[in-house]
Amino acid sequence: MNQLATGKFISRKRKEKNYTQEQLAEKLGVSNKTISKWETGKCMPDYSIIKNLCEELQITVAELIDGGEAGEKNIRLYDDEQIVDLLRRIQELEKQKNLVFGILLVVMGGALQALSYSIDGSNIKDFFSGILLGISIAEMIIGVYVLGRSVAER
């Protein structure tokens, strides 16, 4: 799946229907910036909106994913429902991956912080302890940020 090819295909089909990005966005209940992100290949439409998008553009889900019209010789192994379900699962796995990544960052930050407190003694050890403490705090902040974004997307 090539996001850029899919985006160009969405743009072409939208223009064939004489829709502006704003008009298509209004029909789908999204912002025109979302349509722009799809068309530039920055992101793909959410699984929950793919059916409506395909209906508006009068294309199949397979054509959307392929980024072009299906040829006469194309053989379809999956129907649109199966493709949408697969996309839903992929998007859910991406969200879970981000959640696990955020948790991992927070845990690793806590471990580094504990390690920094266990190092004491000379000036060099204090220096390294300070560096570890700084890294641990930064890591935990990033982890909390990733967790927050992951939870907000749900």
Image: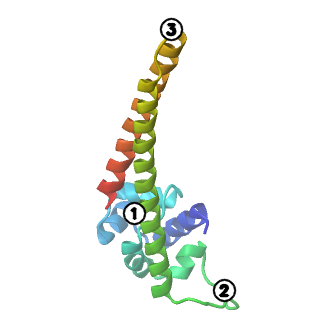
Q: For residue 78, which quarter of the picture? A: bottom right
Whether residue 45 can be seen here = no
Q: Residues within 10 Å of mark 3 (few under 14, many from 20)?
A: few
**Residue position marked by numbered label 2 in the rendering:** 71
* Residues marked 2 and 1 touching at CB (< 8 Å): no
Q: Residue at x 40, y 43 (%)?
A: 106
Q: Is residue 110 above or below residue 99?
A: above
Whether residue 142 can be seen here = yes
Q: Which amino acid type is marked by label 2?
A: Gly
Secondary structure type for disc 1:
loop
Residue 46 lies, in percent from the top left, at 41, 68
Residue 42 lies, in percent from the top left, at 51, 55
Q: For residue 133, which quarter of the picture? A: top left
Pick the front one: 89 or 29 = 89
**Residue position marked by numbered label 3 in the rendering:** 123
Residue 85 lies, in percent from the top left, at 45, 80
Q: Residue at x 43, y 74 (%)?
A: 88
Quadrant occupied by the N terminus: bottom right
**Residue position marked by numbered label 1 in the rendering:** 20
